[in-house]
């Protein structure tokens, strides 16, 4: 993911991001976004406990979406 973003014109610093999922690849995505200065990162997952665990690890947040 890191190499792909570096080749693109996507500016991560200061951006708001949404990561869907809370597995290994989502964790790598959140870590990359965090390291490159994303302003806010939301983690959304089918299982809220896993999303909250990942959000706590990287000081991100889980959006409150009723019924999701």
Image (cartoon, rainbow, N blue to C red):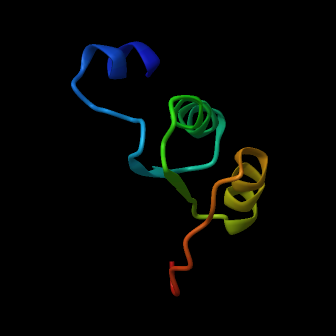
How many marks are shown on the rendered structure? 0
Q: Is residue 23 left or right of residue 68?
A: right
Tell me where residue 35 appears, x and y as whole percent: 59, 29
Quadrant (top left/top right/bottom left/bottom right) for the N terminus: top left
Q: Is residue 1 left or right of residue 25?
A: left
Residue at the location (75% across, 64% down)? 49
In the image, residue 10 above or below residue 64:
above
Residue at the location (39% across, 35% down)? 12
Q: Is residue 28 left or right of residue 11?
A: right
Q: Within the image, what quadrant is residue 44 found in?
A: bottom right
* Viewer-nearest residue: 20 or 60: 60
Tell me where residue 63 appears, x and y as whole percent: 55, 71
In the image, residue 62 above or below residue 41:
below
Tell me where residue 57 appears, x and y as whole percent: 78, 46
In the image, residue 64 above or below residue 13:
below
Q: Residue farthest to the bottom?
A: 66
Q: Within the image, what quadrant is residue 58 found in?
A: top right
* Viewer-nearest residue: 48 or 62: 62
* Viewer-nearest residue: 8 or 1: 8
In the image, residue 62 above or below residue 54:
below
Residue at the location (45% across, 19% down)? 2
* Viewer-nearest residue: 5 or 38: 38
Tell me where residue 29 appears, x and y as whole percent: 53, 34
């Amino acid at each position: 993911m890191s190499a792909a973003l570096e080749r693109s014109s996507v500016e991560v610093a200061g951006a708001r991001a949404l990561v869907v999922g809370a597995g290994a690849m989502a964790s790598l995505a959140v870590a990359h976004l965090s390291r490159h200065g994303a302003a806010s990162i939301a983690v959304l997952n089918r299982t809220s406990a896993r999303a909250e665990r990942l959000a706590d690890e990287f000081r991100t947040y889980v959006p409150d979406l009723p019924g999701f």
